Image (spheres, rainbow, N blue to C red):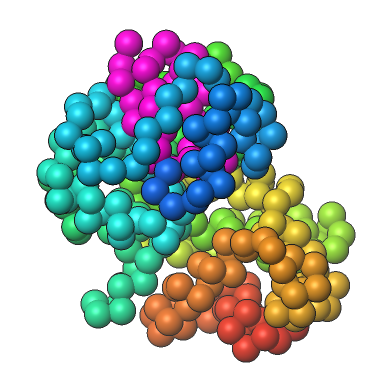
Amino acid sequence: MKKILIIGGGAMGSAFSIPCIDNNHKVFITEPYSQRFIKNLSSKNKFHSALKINLPKKLKFKKYSNELFYEKYDLIVIALSLTGIEFIASELKKFKVKSPILVLTKGLKYEKQNKKILTISQTLLKSFPKLNLSVLKGPCLAKELARKCQTSVIIANKNIQIAKLLGKMISTKYYLIEYSKDVVGVEICSAIKNIYSMIIGSGMSLNKSSSLFQKSLSEMKYITKRLKGKEDTVLSLAGVGDLYVSAAGGRNSKMGNYLGQGFTFQRAKKKFMANDTVEGEQLVREIAPFILKKFNSKKIPLMFQMIRSILKNKKFLI
């Protein structure tokens, strides 16, 4: 039995607790931000409003405080949104955390001072280089994992043996793990697929969407290689796998559909998705300064067109 702490009580962090508990581990979950999730997780029946299920009775809720990091854990899982990464980076550094870290968060950060793109792991390691850090990505819808639908994900660590040890700790008959040494490539793919999901969603027909899917993969390969990842990673669960599940359904694909109908982003957001977070749009705004300056529009025309569409609120025309 291992002792696992999950930081982040949203849909993915809470769903991730289920295979951990099914491996008979002692699992704790904490939530630094959302009062709604704190109420959910600390209630008697542990009903999770986003997942629409009661979480396992064995899952223990801990109030977020400094005392958390005085305890020893066999694994700490970061399942916060992108906005919480710099906060948790400072916390891990402050308390000199030695436990292995597994990052579920997807996204990229643009470092304005040095004018470069950082992955989540690079952001954490910049703050605290001594972290023992792995990342977990892939095509995983939290609601399906919570219901124990068969799910395959990928753990990346430059030391593949560490990745395999973590995989052995959390894998089940329904939660299957693959492995990679390409941490950067896995993180890049898992982030930019949100933008390309919008692009594929704009197709308005299977014929056009399939063409956009192929062109999206091509652009993802180019971007991944330019950002020091491996092209082959685009064909892994972190790339084509995650792109497929995102394009098949979800907020990014939904927004893409409205763009395909001729709505501008702002009009579609206000009219149809006012209360929804569109991760692809957030990422566009984050990385656009770097992409527009460092990349050739002829190499990644779909990406440039989506950036133009969102930043200038123009119709998405392809």
- List x then y, in percent, for residue 234: 50, 49
Q: Is residue 171 above or below residue 145?
A: above
The structure residue drawn at horizontal position 17% and vertical position 34%, both measured from the top left corner, is: 70
Residue 316 visible in the shown view: no
Establish if 250 lies above or below 161: below
Coordinates of residue 89 in the picture (x, y in percent): 26, 53
Question: Total of numbered circles in the picture?
Answer: 0
Instruction: Answer whether residue 56 is magenta in the image.
Output: no
Quarter of the figure with residue 276: bottom right
Q: Is residue 94 above or below residue 181?
A: below
Residue closer to the observer: 196 or 2:
2
Direction from residue 312 to residue 154 in the image, left or right: left
Left or right of residue 241, residue 161 in this image: left
**Where is residue 45 shown, x and y percent of the image?**
60, 24
Instruction: Please determine whether, in this image, residue 201 is positioned above or below residue 44.
Output: below
In the rendered image, which quarter is residue 108 located in?
Answer: bottom left
Q: Quadrant of residue 116?
A: bottom left
Please state the horizontal and vertical placement of residue 202, each as a whole percent of the image.
77, 66
Span of residues in magenta = 1-30
Viewer-side residue, 272 vs 42? 42
Q: Residue at x 37, y 66 (%)?
A: 109
- Quadrant of image for the C terminus: bottom right
Identified at 49% across, 56% down, the residue is: 191
Q: Does residue 26 show up magenta in the picture?
A: yes
Q: Is residue 56 left or right of residue 306?
A: left
x 84%, y 55%: residue: 206
Frontmost residue, 269 versus 91: 91
> Is 143 displayed left or right of 138 in the figure?
right
